[in-house]
Image: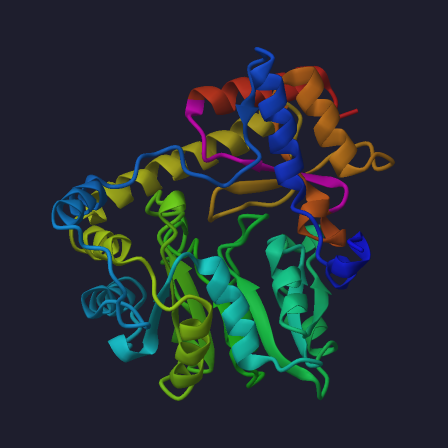
Amino acid sequence: MISNSQTSHLDSIDSFLAMEIFSRAQQLEAQGREVIHLEFGEPDFSAPESAAESIRKSMEINDAGYTFSQGLEGLRNEIAKKYLRDYGVDILPEQVLVSNGSSLLLYLSVCLLAPPGSEVILTDPAYACYANAIRLAGAKPVFVKLHHEDGFQLNVSELKKQVTKKTKAILINSPMNPTGVVFSEEVMQSLAELDIPVISDEIYADLSFEDQPHSFLSYSPQTVAINGFSKSFAMTGWRLGYMITPEEWMPAADRLHQNLMISATEFVQEAGAAVLQKSTAYCEQMKAEFNRRRLFVLERMSELGMELGYTPTGAFYVLYKYRDSGKSSLDLCHEVLEKTGVAIAPGRDFGSAAEGYIRISYAQSMENIERALTKLAESKLLTS
């Protein structure tokens, strides 16, 4: 007999609530309603032309076979060059493993460092999938709260209180989703001094607007750095990510990857190498535009009586604390969508500490951002 009890072991895996908002938004659009999408962190730019050019060449020669499981040597060489050029970190191509997107690598990183029954410390709020990846790996997520009054900076003294004999890793994300905060150099140095392996999600590293972009590898070699092409290269659907580990950890990581994925798609890897070689100027233009939008959002929200109370300096998100604390963030986001046609993400998606907040993504055109913020302010749903 088939029943849902057969999948009950996955009941602890939460849904991605932003997808619920997106699904309803699609229904409204199918009915002829206009929706402004600020619920996802998906750049509104096209992928660099060098990526498309590379794919066209690959298709002409039908270049789509298995590759070495760690990834094409040419791409891993380019990644090593990038980390030296952009972050001042000297790594070997042998330390790089390429996969189809960074999400699988997050799960793989937890499996690599945290045996079943152990603990991984992460922030609250944090990206929605982190805690689920830890649970799927059989480990336990342990949360350290980030405080609005501290500008959502990580308090390492509070984190230390969560360290136990079962702690095997710390998972961080800077610049951060959902707050847009870049952790300070003091925070990073204090984390390194704990002498605990760190999984550093660096997918937004290049989108640091007021400080020099950096990698946690600058602070500690006991690091699994995860990065990819989705955000700063506007290649979300291309599904190309990579991880960097100490050489001593790579054989185990590679064995896991062979069993889970075999290898990343060959022609997408070739496109990644082409982008790293040829598209620096294009990506810098995107970064400048994201920063222009960030500054506009901060100024416009202040003018509309929607002060953030902190300053995000990276990624392309702001986390706003709405007034009606008695209303759940999911219910509020549904109400906002129905009444204004603006899709935003509920804070609850990112942890219990983000309940009472909504996340706004400015990975949209300036025109749409302006219209959306005006609609939100005029509705008074967030401010009364």
Check residue 359 for magenta coloring.
yes
* Whether residue 72 is visible: yes
Residue stretch in magenta: 355-366
- Is residue 82 shown left or right of residue 239? left
Residue 266 in the image: state x and y as whole percent. 26, 58
Side of 278 relative to 195 (left or right) = left
Instruction: Determine whether 73 is above or below 178 in the image.
Output: below
Image quarter of the N terminus: bottom right
Q: Residue at x 34, y 34 (%)?
A: 45
Work out whether residue 275 or residue 378 is closer to the camera in this orientation and state it.
275
Residue 363 rendering spot, x and y as whole percentages: 45, 35
The residue positioned 49% from the left and 67% from the top of the image is: 200
Q: Residue 177: say if magenta.
A: no
Classify 218 as above or below 75.
Answer: below
Residue sitting at the far top: 32
Q: Whole-percent x and y of residue 29?
A: 57, 18
